[in-house]
Image (spheres, coloured by chain):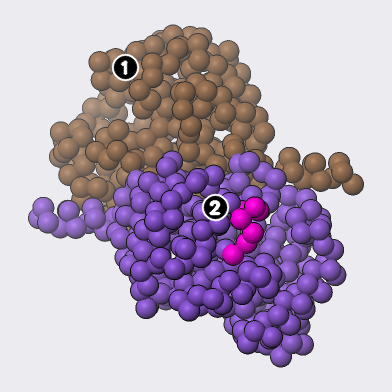
Chain colours: A purple, B brown
Amino acid sequence: MADLPGRIRINEEGPREGFQFEKGPIATARKIALIDALSHTGLRQIQVVSFVPPQNVPGMADADDVVAGIRVNPEVAYTALWLNEKGLQRALGHDRLTIVGSIGLTCSEPFLLRNQKRTLQQNIDAQRSLLDMYRANGVAVRRGGLMAAFGCNFAGDIPPARVVDMVGQLLDLAREAGESLDFVSLADTMAWATPLSIRRVVGAVRERFPGLKLSLHLHDTRGMGIANACAGLEMGVDTFDAAVAGLGGCPFAAHKGAAGNVCTEDLVFLCDEMGVETGIDLSALMDAALLAEEVVGHPLPGSVKSGGSLKALRERIAAAH
Amino acid sequence: MADLPGRIRINEEGPREGFQFEKGPIATARKIALIDALSHTGLRQIQVVSFVPPQNVPGMADADDVVAGIRVNPEVAYTALWLNEKGLQRALGHDRLTIVGSIGLTCSEPFLLRNQKRTLQQNIDAQRSLLDMYRANGVAVRRGGLMAAFGCNFAGDIPPARVVDMVGQLLDLAREAGESLDFVSLADTMAWATPLSIRRVVGAVRERFPGLKLSLHLHDTRGMGIANACAGLEMGVDTFDAAVAGLGGCPFAAHKGAAGNVCTEDLVFLCDEMGVETGIDLSALMDAALLAEEVVGHPLPGSVKSGGSLKALRERIAAAH
């Protein structure tokens, strides 16, 4: 495990994933309480809301109030999601948000056609429009996202060579707009990845684009989330999306068993125990995970919040001696 | 991932783990139904009951009836657990059981003292008595087990060198009794293992005892079960205990969040997708996992039973073309 990074960065997506996915309704104050708790765990980036039409995502109807209500920790970058100019404008209305321009492609045309009613080419055109929109608003584009990078419920397996090609298309799109991506996020949108495919895809992309920073967005639908994150760590990946307590799910996968993102506190536990620094206080994060369960009103899938950390046990053992 | 074994063997422990751990009561016929379903999945070894005093483990009061009621698949070895001569005699009363003599040590004396009221030395003496008992009953001793091989809630971290030493003690015990162990099972009894410690411990044991076959018994309390199994696979380990749907838990760990064994169908999914043969029909196993939930009357932790296999999706995609 020689390639383990010394330190990773976790982008917490639990609030946005959870409030979007959960039937709720969840009181605005409770959403804010969860975000505030997460803000004091050592997490440095928290995606808090998406600015989308409330008729599409009722749980985001109070997105502006949620953002306005956060007790801001200046060490945390609070981010948001949007799908169009209107959403971006709402985000730009909040000084407290960190605005990161992002473009995204999808490896599967059947998935695109089904969920966004776009062909691959139409989606490329849509990203060009997004780049225009960012330029018009003075927003730098720093992030590229690639959905269905490990497989698709409608297209099946995705060959690593296709992922490499799509990453190239993302980089080209940015370049032609005079932008330079800080990193590309490879998303296992429908939970097809295994440690083997993580290694193959990350390896293939890295071979073609050695200097490119990669991030992984993993889902846990088939229980592979932590094993896949571990495979990413072993490939030297140092940025991960995760969701506290495993909040969320993929409402677009036409799949009722679809589980949320890989669980933040389980990932932090893995890192703590393998000597990879996260800067996060696992104990505070476990408290936030238990709060997340209270806020949504039902059990959530993460394990360490109920299984307990080893640090606490080690301290108890040391105290007894 | 060059060291992945071509084929692994899974020892299904779900029935024994589950019926022992679940509050129940579960009707005998339902227990038998689950075992019969598991018998037709391709599993070749199923641990079905433990012969222990019913006042200690009420869920095993009907162990003899369960064994007598199984619709035997001749390709399956049905095994049982016992702790003393009385239990062994009950097991020997059933022709349909495969009787495997086993001795076991524990890496942690505080755990031993707490749960078996024995020192390390007293436990070694107890294993000598077991070996005598097996010899008196004409039972060959083929399995060595090592509990708390990756850490202990009462002793803390266990150094790999200690595990190596304890494996040596197991082999010596067998040798002095004229027995030869087929394999040693390393048990992560209290879920302290991570992929890193799996590699370190398996690597250290293998370096000292290159010809010794190892098996892993993993718990999922902290969500590391599949990642740990994957680390074992990558070290070439080819025998795993697992429990359908993640049945079970460790009632001796003084730990209410303790989860069951690594989930069989999630492990089979991992193997299927990484090209490691198990001989198991994942679809039939997922049906058995759903039956297990019905039998115990509450949700169980495995993911693939609700997340679905990729084989089914691939078939649907192929049929649509």
The chain ID associated with circle 1 is B
Q: Which residue is mark 2?
A: A59
* Residue B140 appears in the rendering: no
Q: Is residue A130 left or right of residue B112?
A: right
Look at the picture and state if B5 lies above or below B19.
Answer: below
Task: Give percent across and percent down for residue B42.
Answer: 63, 30
What is the crowding at mark 1: few (fewer than 14 residues within 10 Å), some, or many (at least 20)? Answer: some
Mark 1 or mark 2: which is in front? 2
Please tell me the numbered disc located at residue A206. none
Residue range of the region highlighted in magenta in the rendering: A51-57
Mark 1 in CB contact with mark 2 (< 8 angstroms): no
Q: Residue at x 20, y 47 (%)?
A: B154
Q: Is residue A138 left or right of residue B298?
A: right
Task: Give percent across and percent down for residue B171.
Answer: 34, 43
Query: Is B86 part of what is drawn in magenta?
Result: no
Residue type at tag 2 = Gly
What is the crowding at mark 2: few (fewer than 14 residues within 10 Å), some, or many (at least 20)? Answer: many
Query: Is A53 part of what is drawn in magenta?
Result: yes
Task: Give percent across and percent down for residue B2.
Answer: 61, 61
Q: CA distance from mark 1 to mark 2?
A: 46 Å
Residue B44, quarter of picture: top right
